[in-house]
Structures are given as C-alpha cells and as structure tokens.
Amino acid sequence: MRRVYLACSALVVMSAPLAAQVEYPVDLRIGGITGSTRRDISVDNSVTDRLDASVKGVEAFLGAKGGGVGIGGRILNGTYGADDFTQREARLFVGENWFRIEGAYGERSLLGTDTTVLFIRAGARSIVQIGGTGVSISISGSKTFQGDFSHSKSDTSRKPDGWEGESSVFYTAPKIPVYVQLGYRADYFKYQGRAEHMNGIVFGLGLWLGGR
C-alpha cells in the first residue's frame, strides 16, 4: 500500500507542471484573419458601388509581458469584383495591455484605380483578460493621417483621411497557446474625393504566447 501511495504521489507531482498555467516572458501573437466584408465606394459623396468579398490576411504582435514597447504588423488582401485590395502596415505600441497607444505606417490600394496611398494611423487599443478563463476582450480605434510627405502641405487633395475601429473576443486554449477570434471591424478611407467604407465580421486563428 505504501508503494502504491508513493507511486500515486509521484504521478501527481510529475503531472502538476502540465496542468499549471505556463508563464511566458513575452506577449507574442501571430495568426491568420479572414472576414466577410461589405465595401461601399463613393465619389464626391455619391455612392457608386457596393461590393461584398472575403478579406484575408496575417496579423502579428510582439511585446514585453508586463507592457512597455511592442511592435507588430498586418497584411490584408481581398478581391472585390475585378479589383484587388491590399493593405500593409507596420505598427508600434506603447503602454500596457489594458491601455496602449498605437501607431502605424503603411500603404493601401484604392479599388478601381492604380493608386496606392501611403498613410499613418494613430489611436489606442485596450485588451482585457477575463481572469484565468482564457477569454480576452479587445477594443481599438484610430485616425488616419497623411503618410506621403513628398507633396506640399497645402495640397489637401493628396492627404488621406479616415478612421478605423475594431472589437474582438479572443479565446486561448488552456494547455496549448492557440487562440480563436471573433470580432467586428469597420473603417473609412478617403483620398482625392474618393471614399471607401468597409465593415464586416472578423474571424481569426493563431498562436498567442501570453494569451491567458
């Protein structure tokens, strides 16, 4: 009986590290995203097209576990009718997860044209983890500014304008750092009298070290 007790105790001790939550020294999230979106295109404030499409991409973030400075990026691709849409951006974060300032520099294509617009985004993001459940809630909002400074500051027609907002719920598995994401994203982008408004549901799947 004593040997059986010792053997059981040894199994408990050996299995404890597997059941315990792993603590990662960094906050690393990388995964694929896809969404069913609707895109309204208007010229001189008159809607010319309403198009539905699936937008896919990759999103990544790397920062210190306790907050501070982090870097990231996002690539989005989609096809609306006969036109391709692409958006690429590099990101910089400052602050803790519950509230951090976000900046981005990137380029975006305009549907129906050969134009690619450089832009800067600035805003804030909040990610709140719900205890040890693995559930996290993320809310973000940002404003779009001019990214190409080769033109005159007085030439307002070449200055992009717009905004972006997104809310998501993440769930990270308890023993493997895999997450799923469900959210809603909307943005508005205007350049030289042409405006695009995109909104839709976002789905995501990937790896998140520090998601619990």
Image (cartoon, rainbow, N blue to C red):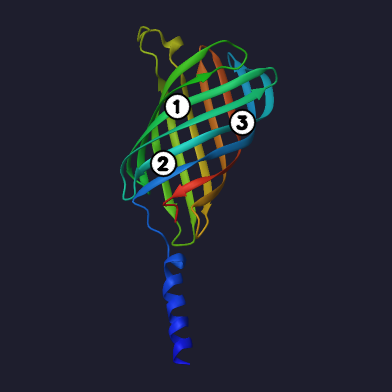
> For the view shown, which residue lies furthest in the bottom direction?
1
Nearer mark to the viewer, of 2 and 3: 3
Q: Which residue is mark 3?
A: 55
Mark 3 or 1, nearer chain start: 3
Q: In the depicted view, which residue is nearer to us: 11 or 48? A: 11
Residue 186, how many percent across, how many down?
A: 55, 34
Q: In the depicted view, which residue is nearer to us: 45 or 83? A: 83
> For the view shown, which residue lies furthest in the front direction?
3
Identify which amino acid the numbered label 3 is placed on: Val
Residue 170, how many percent across, how many down?
A: 52, 50
Count of marks placed on residues: 3
Q: Quadrant of residue 43?
A: top right
Asked if the residue under mark 3 is in contact with the one under mark 2, i.e. CB atoms within 8 Å, the reply is no
Residue 172, how many percent across, how many down?
A: 51, 54
Identify which amino acid the numbered label 2 is placed on: Arg
Mark 2 or 3, nearer chain start: 3
Residue in the picture at 43% in, 21% down: 119
Mark 1 or 2, nearer chain start: 1
Residue in the picture at 52% in, 24% down: 87
Identify which amino acid the numbered label 1 is placed on: Glu
Between the residue at mark 2 and the residue at mark 3, the CA separation in whole angstroms equals: 22 Å
Q: Residues within 10 Å of mark 1 (few under 14, many from 20)?
A: many
Q: Residues within 10 Å of mark 2 (few under 14, many from 20)?
A: many
Numbered circle sitting on residue 125:
2
Nearer mark to the viewer, of 1 and 2: 1
Q: Which residue is mark 1?
A: 89
Please tell me whether mark 1 sits on a helix, a strand or a loop: strand
Check the image and report above or below for 76 versus 8.
above
